[in-house]
Amino acid sequence: MNGAEATLATLADAGVDACFANPGTSEMQMVAAFDREPRVRPILALFEGVVTGAADGYARVAGKPAATLLHLGAGLGNGVANLHNAKKGYSPIVNLVGDHAVHHQPYDAPLASDILGIARPVSVWAKASTTADTLVALSAEAVAASQGALPGPATLTVPADSAWSPATGPSAPRPVPARGVPSPERIEALARRLRAAKKPVVLMGSLACTDRGIRAAGRLNALGWRVMTDTFISRLPRGAGRYAPDRMMYFGEMALADLAGSDLLVLAGTKLPVAFFAYPAMPSVLVPEGCETAVLAEVEEDAVAALEALADAAGAPERFGVVDRTTPAAASGELTAYSVGESLSRHMPDHALVCDDAVTAGLPIFMQTKTARPHDWMMLTGGAIGWAMPAAIGAGVAAPDRKVVSLTGDGAGAYTVQSLWTMARENLDVTVVVFANHSYRILNIEMARTGSGQAGPRASQLLDLSHPKMSWCDLAKGFGVPATRCTDAAGFDAAFAKAMHEPGPKLIEAVFG
């Protein structure tokens, strides 16, 4: 075995079975190794931002890392935005980033760069290999590190000579570090504080929002305590038959108003809530005056076990309120985010996976799908748009038996439109809904909120997407994905119902203006 072959075998032995890739010359030994390691599926994307977003979506659904194969620092740089989202969503990923051969590195070739310098801000672990055997050993370490107490992307450089040189053989899987569990004393103390509080709130982060965590949250809510999630959650189980916690408001002033009067905020696998951005005369920390804070579980701790222990310590009932299934009437009239949400609620099958990068259309759709069939909702955890279509690729690879719905704005979708090609190539069961309002609408809202004034003719040029308008149906068809354009609610309802009953990739362009 050479280093490349031993590395792929090491990843496969550790449970990695998919690699999203956009390779170059320095990765050719890794590319060749796929012919000799059938346990790892290679999946090509046309842009590195699609590669990294797909690995994120895969991790959120599979609960384990996929690998990425990227071409030097430039390729890694192209994938940074969705690695940022993955890190904020605690998604395990193993990035294999090709590098020049060690003896070639001193010559500052055109594609030479500081790969680890690019990687560290979006990685929980980043190391460089120098020989074939260190490459193999570090690849096993990377898989374990990506799934540690604080999961996230692990990045490893792969010098070309480490890949082509002989290796001793694969490296055995490393044990995944266990997550700490809060002490019984901490649990009991918090149970007492919550009982004594007049208006307590328990705030859950991404790692707390599993099926078990949501069930424990429902038990706590049955005691009369309010339970909320962070604004953006990596993956939220929801729909009929499940407890539905409240969601932290996006705009800071709304969040503070919603929390007004709360006297105790308990953090379960999350940090103090803060505003997405700074605004004139607005606080950064979204904790109302007079509200105390306490930690049930740090982000690095097992928040799910802590919530279950808290429910037991507090004597919470096993039965609690869940969402009943209701079916909205067939949508008609004007096409809006609310009518789109009604159509999703009507037609999404059991256990659908939703990837939401719909920006201003996202919240109304989220609200309208509360009583849909059981499904999982994945959110833009890091705020870097251009995530939903790549994430849907990963979700479709991880769960080929589940329908995947990707919700994206036209501005967001344009960042990673190349995703459509990979969906078609892999024949993934993904329905993409693009909200074509021909504007960066959220930025028009933020112009006023930041005190920047009304956009004039020149400023408007940086917010407007209508000159020229993108034709999403033509774009989709060019990449091999069938597409439909809808301008009213009834047309969208029919198109979405059809997509839910047919396999394979589809795109629906929902025109809002």
Image (spheres, rainbow, N blue to C red):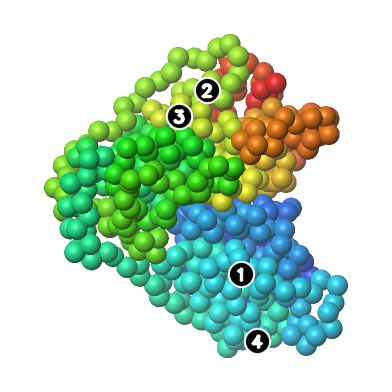
Q: Residue at x 20, y 51 (%)?
A: 193
- Label number found at residue 367: 3
Residue 39, quarter of the rendered image: bottom right
Residue 221, quarter of the rendered image: top left
Q: Position of residue 265 (x, y in %)?
A: 32, 48
- Label number found at residue 338: 2
- Label number found at residue 120: 1
CA distance for labels 4 and 1: 21 Å
Looking at the image, is mark 2 or mark 4 nearer the viewer? 2
Q: Residues within 10 Å of mark 4 (few under 14, many from 20)?
A: many
Residue 392, quarter of the rendered image: top right
Say left or right for 92 vs 200. Answer: right
Q: Residue at x 84, y 83 (%)?
A: 107
Q: Position of residue 497 (x, y in %)?
A: 54, 24
Which residue was labeled with disc 4?
131
Q: Position of residue 245 (x, y in %)?
A: 35, 38
Q: Residue furthest front?
A: 281
Asked whether 401 or 244 is in front, the reply is 244
Question: Disc 4 residue type?
Answer: Thr
Task: Tell me if I can see residue 380 in this picture.
Answer: no
Q: Is tag 4's residue or tag 1's residue first in the polypeptide sequence?
A: 1
User: In the rendered structure, are the residues bearing label 2 and label 1 in contact, judged by CB atoms less than 8 Å apart?
Assistant: no
CA distance for labels 3 and 1: 37 Å
Q: Secondary structure at mark 4?
A: loop
Q: Is tag 2's residue or tag 1's residue first in the polypeptide sequence?
A: 1
Q: Secondary structure at mark 3?
A: helix
Task: Tell me if I can see residue 405 in this picture.
Answer: yes
